[in-house]
Amino acid sequence: MIANKLTSVPADQSIAEIQKMLLGFRASRMMIDYEGDSPASLAFQVDRNGHKISFRLPCNWESMLEALKRENVPIRYRNKEHAQRVAWRVLRDWVRAQLTLIEAGVAKVEEVMLPWAILGDGQTVAQRMLTSKGLIGLPAPESDGAK
């Protein structure tokens, strides 16, 4: 079940709401990356114990469009613009949930945002994990035969 699948909230409004939440979280250096005329990701930086950590939150609207098709949403919602609205709205909800966990002390920013941390080569941790074998060079745990 896709949340917000029939949203009418424009992508730029969801992006602005995400930015406002991140500002309240003391994020800095926010930047929106575009692919053509479409917002593709939102990058930001936080200062943790004197160290600056940068994150990039991707908005994969193409996958969202495929998911909307699988959900059999009405045909008028099966387009790029609507998929972008839904994807950014879902990302907004995710950011709100993660910031709530951080504010409540349930998790640290590094724990919930780690996949989106930007590495020295510009890739995110998630991208590196998906393109390398294993968890960024960490050996896979050995099986002891227990199930």
Image (spheres, helix red, strand yellow):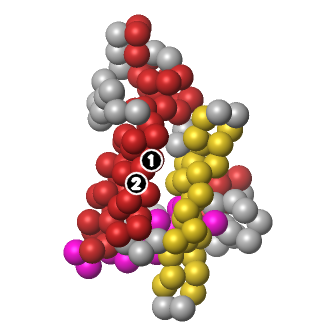
- Specify the label residue 18 is tagged with: 2
**Is residue 129 among what the camera can see?**
no
**How dense is the environment of label 1, judged by Cα within 10 Å: few (below 14), some, or many (20 and up)?**
many
Q: Residue at x 31, y 57 (%)?
A: 96
Quarter of the rendering containing residue 134: bottom right
Q: Measuring from the top left, give residue 126's x and y in whole percent.
A: 59, 57
Image coords of residue 18 (percent x, y): 40, 54
Q: Are marks 1 and 2 in contact (CB under 8 Å)?
A: yes
Q: Secondary structure at mark 2?
A: helix
Q: Is residue 112 magenta?
A: yes
Query: Which residue position is annotated with label 1?
Result: 15
In front: 81, or 56? Answer: 81
Q: Residue at (56%, 29%) from the top-left corner?
A: 62
Magenta residues, start to end = 104-118
Q: Is 110 on the left-hand or right-hand side of 142?
A: left
Q: Residue furthest left?
A: 104
Who's the residue at 32% across and 49% down the image? 93
Q: Quadrant of the C terminus?
A: bottom left
